[in-house]
Amino acid sequence: MKHFTRRNFLKTASVTAAALSLDALSWARAAGANGDIRVAQIGFRSQGGGHINTLSKMKGVRVVALCDVDRNVLNKKAQDLGSGVTAYTDIRKLLENKDIDAVSIATPNHWHALATVWACQAGKDVYVEKPASHNLFEGRKMVEAARKYKRIVQVGTQCRSSVGLQEAVQYVQSGKLGKIIMARGFCYKGRKSIGLVDGPQQVPEHIDYELWCGPASNAAPRRNGSSGPVHYDWHWFWEYGNGDYGNQGPHQVDIARWFLGEDAIAPFSMAIGGRVGYKDSAETPNTLIVYHGYKIPMIFEVRGLPVNKASQSDGWKMDNYRGATIGNVIECEGGHVLVPSYTEAIVYDKAGKEITRFDGRKAKKTDAVATPTGLAAESGGHHGNWIAAIRSRKVKDLHADVIEGHVSSGLVHTGNISYLLGATKAPGEIRESLLKHPSFGEAFNRMAGHLDANGVDIVKEQLQLGVPLEFHPRKERFLDNDQANAMLSRKYRAPFVVPEKV
């Protein structure tokens, strides 16, 4: 495999000879410390639009460039923002511009790592959406690039910037609710069928599909949902996305890991699930449970089907677990903590009586958000914390440094690999395999009941029992499983290659 090194990048991008003599630290503009920080937004049809809105309201920050492979989306937003913004379809051209200090990335998952590595090599600080990476290898390369080029790289797990959750974690870790027994995360988010297509679909002319595919295969799309053949539904195809575990899961496993105080990927992972209840073109499971074997177990659950079959035609109402639909429940000796949103945590005793609650919305009486070191960040929450760290040049000021994003995304990847290597099994066989993990068995029984309520017979429509995977957290390799290790990276499409040596 040909390595796409910084030297190759600069050559390919046709950066001027003068720029070639500058190391990454020299690219850290005077403006970053004393003047406006000039930010480019890469990808903004969906989540990136929120990035632009947030950044545009911050003092000392200017959105000076946009990059999107959809020319219709690009031209409209460029027109909205006015003449002070330069528009690009090719990220490589954008990164040539030495008047850009930082980039905010909200592309599909398969672009996150390469965009981050290239930006670090070009001397830009980075905000990148979750999941940090599309595979585990990429996440480690992102960390290496951030450190080598001394870049400030924040991952978009914005829960870390919630004052309410910061206080809740401190409360639990101080022992006020006793020892943690179990950390749970939930994504009970309605996912209807994306429909079936009968073959490759035509890509609209206003989308540069070659650039959209980037590191992934450029085969014609085999989907055509409400967002068209390219946008959004890529989440449910392994070539580009990571399913709902990779879409919503990085938030909840990050919160669970935060409460547990774990700083590495779990040494054991196993998944069970399937795409059930309807037949469509998508690949990733709409029903999933993943067990991560830390000393204190972590379990994550995906449910795309509603609370029951009647709800499929009447509002698609979703189920909940102790009040969590998309959120967390941290079970402790003396009660539990419900995290129902990105900003709030409610503490209950063993009898279910509320003890106290932590609400980041009430804590934010001003536009500032305090960092763990007490540094005041500009308005804008998680992006504000990133901007403050860009000014201080201190990685420790970040709430969600790239290493945190890498570890939480790594949990997603190990769980998905277990699922992909699995095989369909009868319910009895699945239950027998979970006897050593009673909490996992309990989660499976609830999942089976939920599917039964939706008219899914798991005897006939069997679920996939994932392979139990042991993992070396420091080496970031699976133990005695070559198949699993082969899935830690992917086959890249030149020149869009995440390099071994960044």
Image (cartoon, rainbow, N blue to C red):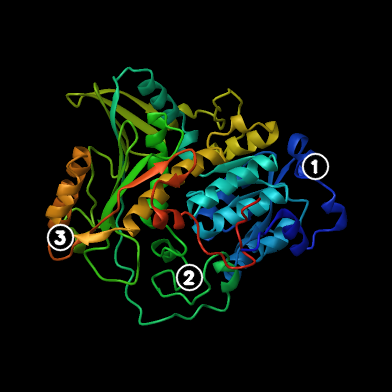
User: Residue 25 at x, y = what percent?
Assistant: 76, 40
Q: Mark 3 or mark 1: name the one nearer the start of the chain.
A: 1
Q: Which mark is residue 207?
A: none
Distance between the alpha carbons at the discs numbered 3 and 1: 60 Å
The 10 Å Cα crowd at callout 2, few under 14, some 14 to 19, many 20 or more, is many
Q: Nearer the viewer, residue 97 or 479?
A: 479
Task: Name the residue beneath numbered marker 3.
Answer: 458
Distance between the alpha carbons at the discs numbered 2 and 3: 32 Å
The 10 Å Cα crowd at callout 1, few under 14, some 14 to 19, many 20 or more, is few
Identify residue type, mark 2.
Answer: Val
Number of numbered discs: 3
SS assignment at label 2: loop
Q: Mark 2 or mark 3: name the one nearer the start of the chain.
A: 2
Q: In this view, which residue lies farthest toward the front?
A: 480
Task: Determine the residue positioned at 37% across, 36% down.
Answer: 256
156 is higher (above) or lower (below) than 369: below
Question: In the image, which is nearer the foreground, mark 2 or mark 3?
Answer: 3
Task: Name the residue beneath numbered marker 2.
Answer: 230
